[in-house]
Amino acid sequence: MFAVIKTGAKQYKVAVGDVIKVEKLDGEAGDTVSLENVLMFGDDKGVKVGTPTISGTVVTAEILEQARAAKIIVFKKKRRHNYRRKAGHRQEQTVLRVTEIGKGAAKKAAPKKAAAKKEDTKAEEKKAPAKKAPAKKAAAKKPAAKKAAPKKAAAKKPAAKKTATKTKEK
């Protein structure tokens, strides 16, 4: 049994027990995640392809860890201009283990810890005093426009002197 799922703008072919690395998903290690964007599902009975997804089919996975990928070096250079820039980037990712593929009710298994945190933040919002709106800033004055100076006529160059050439008569 396998399924093709879509998460983080990428597609993955998964089977039960597979460990995959996907773009960062919310949750902590040990939480379960339901991936509902199932594009294709295959088993010994046949293959079912969605248009674009198969409704009612869910892939359930367990979060093993929240990690970061290997560093990618970004180097820019313009030759003969003494321009060089070097930067690095590490993408956030989530490591998942697929636990179940099947026709489950499209429920998202909410992690217990995250639900408790949401309730705490709502209670704190109610207790916190209302914040005042920031005062509006005075409109900035525009600088006065400069008057255009009258253009002077271009000075005329003196005419070039003509040299007379004498021809000899024979």
Image (tube, rainbow, N blue to C red):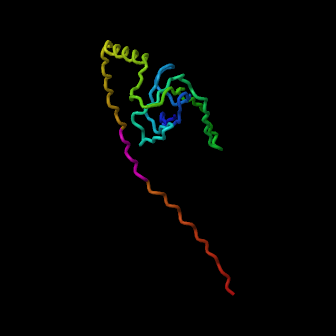
Residue 130 position in % (x across, y down): 30, 16
Q: Which residue corresponds to the image point at 40% horizontal and 48% vertical from the top-left?
A: 149
Q: Work out whether 153 lies above or below 119.
A: below
Q: Is residue 92 visible?
A: no
The main secondary structure of the magenta stretch is: loop
In the displayed structure image, the side of residue 117 where residue 70 appears, left or right: right
Residue 50 within the magenta-colored segment of the rendering = no
Q: Which residue corresponds to the image point at 50% horizontal and 23% vertical from the top-left?
A: 62
Query: In which quadrant is the C terminus drawn?
Result: bottom right
Q: Nearer the viewer, residue 54 or 121?
A: 54
Q: Quadrant of residue 91?
A: top right
> In the orientation shown, which residue stands out farthest toward the top?
127
The residue stretch that appears in magenta:
144-151
Residue 150 within the magenta-colored segment of the rendering = yes
Q: Work out whether 116 lies above or below 67.
A: above
Residue 152 position in % (x across, y down): 43, 54
Q: Which residue corresponds to the image point at 39% horizontal and 33% vertical from the top-left?
A: 56
Count of numbered tags = 0
Residue 15 position in % (x across, y down): 53, 32
In the displayed structure image, the side of residue 38 where residue 125 appears, left or right: left
Residue 145 position in % (x across, y down): 36, 41
Q: Quadrant of residue 125?
A: top left
Q: Nearer the viewer, residue 56 or 110?
A: 56
Q: Nearer the viewer, residue 87 or 116?
A: 116
> In the orientation shown, which residue stands out farthest toward the front?
45
Q: Is residue 67 visible?
A: yes
> In the orientation shown, which residue stands out farthest toward the right?
170
Q: Quadrant of residue 78?
A: top right
Q: Which residue corresponds to the image point at 31% horizontal and 23% vertical from the top-left?
A: 135
Q: Work out whether 59 lies above or below 80.
A: above
In the displayed structure image, the side of residue 128 where residue 13 appears, left or right: right
